[in-house]
Amino acid sequence: MAQSTREIKRRIKGIGSTMQITKAMELVSTAKMRKARIRLDKSRPYYLTVLDSIGDVINNVNINHPLLRKREVKKSLYIVATADRGLAGGYNANITRLIDSKFRNKKDSISLITIGLKGRDFFKSRGYDIVGEFTGISEEPSFSDASEIGNLAVELFLKGEIDEINVVYTRFITTLSHEPIIIKLLPAEEIRENSKVPKKVIDFEPSPEEVLDYLIPKYIESSVFGALIEASSSEQAARRVAMESATDNAEEMIEELNMSYNRARQAAITMEISEIVAGAEALK
């Protein structure tokens, strides 16, 4: 019985140490999430402004721009935003499963730009075509990161190596609610179809072509940056919730083990008293 109480105390100590780690990670994730939310609130108006601007421009031009031209989709590009670390509940699995369930049997039809170690390792191990990989930026992405990713995607589109560009990320809704989604970025002609901006007379300087040459890549970069900021907020929120749940579970386990320890200790004391009484009776 003494061995049993020692084993219970050892388990309590081990779970207590783990609980300290999960609690610390919960506090860190809470601070990072707050910071990411501030960036998200600042970036959303910028992205929406760019989207309104490009919708306004495209709705008022009739030119055969390479980035507006629709073509038969033989190969699609997906920019997939995951995390560099785990311990975030189902955050990474929800994104990777979204793509893998859709293209598991037709991997030749897509190419991937992966963001985050988790996504890169998942898709590489399953034989997907990865044309670009970016790691170490998932928690604190910068606009320069988004520009590099966007430029690579546009370059592949203009070369004809891919026929459409999509971005896959986890949209932040609330701390407890996040939604993995796929957004199509190019061909940008679809922006014209979805635009609600009324037509108007606009003079373009120096020309509509040059305006679109500048504006559409900025739209791609802004969209990717917005997705990265959304994903960063979702990652930290998912990790905070996961660590909070782990801490709560550890506390429950320690409480149950303390009860088991007290019962085992009480049983050991009762047995010792019984042995003493039995010995005393034998001496009579």
Image: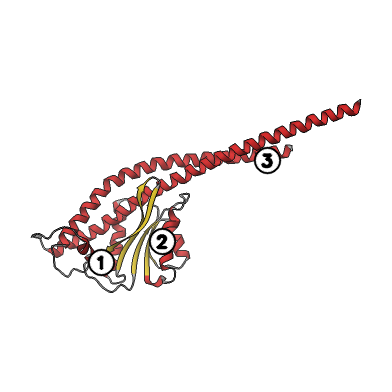
Please tell me which of labels 2 and 3 falls first in the chain. 3
Whether residue 140 is visible here, answered yes or no, is no
* Residue type pointed to by label 2: Leu
Q: Which of the numbered marks, if any, corresponds to residue 7?
A: 3
Viewer-proximal residue among 68 and 146: 68
- Location of residue 7 in the rendering, given as x and y in whole percent from the top left corner: 68, 40
Which mark is nearer the camera, 2 or 3? 2
Residue 57 location (% of width, % of height): 15, 60
The spot of residue 89 in percent (x, y) is 47, 50
Mark 1 residue element = loop
- The reply, left or right, for residue 115 in relation to residue 219 is right
Residue 91 visible: yes
- Pointer 2 residue: 98
Which residue is labeled 1 in the image? 187
> Mark 3: few, some, or many residues within 10 Å (few <14, many ≥20)?
few
> Which of these two is toward me, 164 or 140?
164
In primary-sequence order, the first of circles 1 and 3 is 3
Q: Quadrant of residue 204?
A: bottom left
Number of marks: 3
- Secondary structure at badge 3 equals helix
Q: CA–CA distance between discs 2 and 1?
A: 22 Å
**Camera-nearest residue between 213 and 226:** 226
Q: Is residue 87 above or below residue 7?
A: below
Q: Amino acid at mark 1?
A: Pro
Of residue 127 and residue 183, the one placed in the foreground of this image is 183
Badge 2 element: helix
Q: Residue furthest right?
A: 284
For badge 3, the amino acid type reads Glu
Left-right relation of 209 to 262: left
Q: CA distance from mark 1 to mark 3?
A: 63 Å
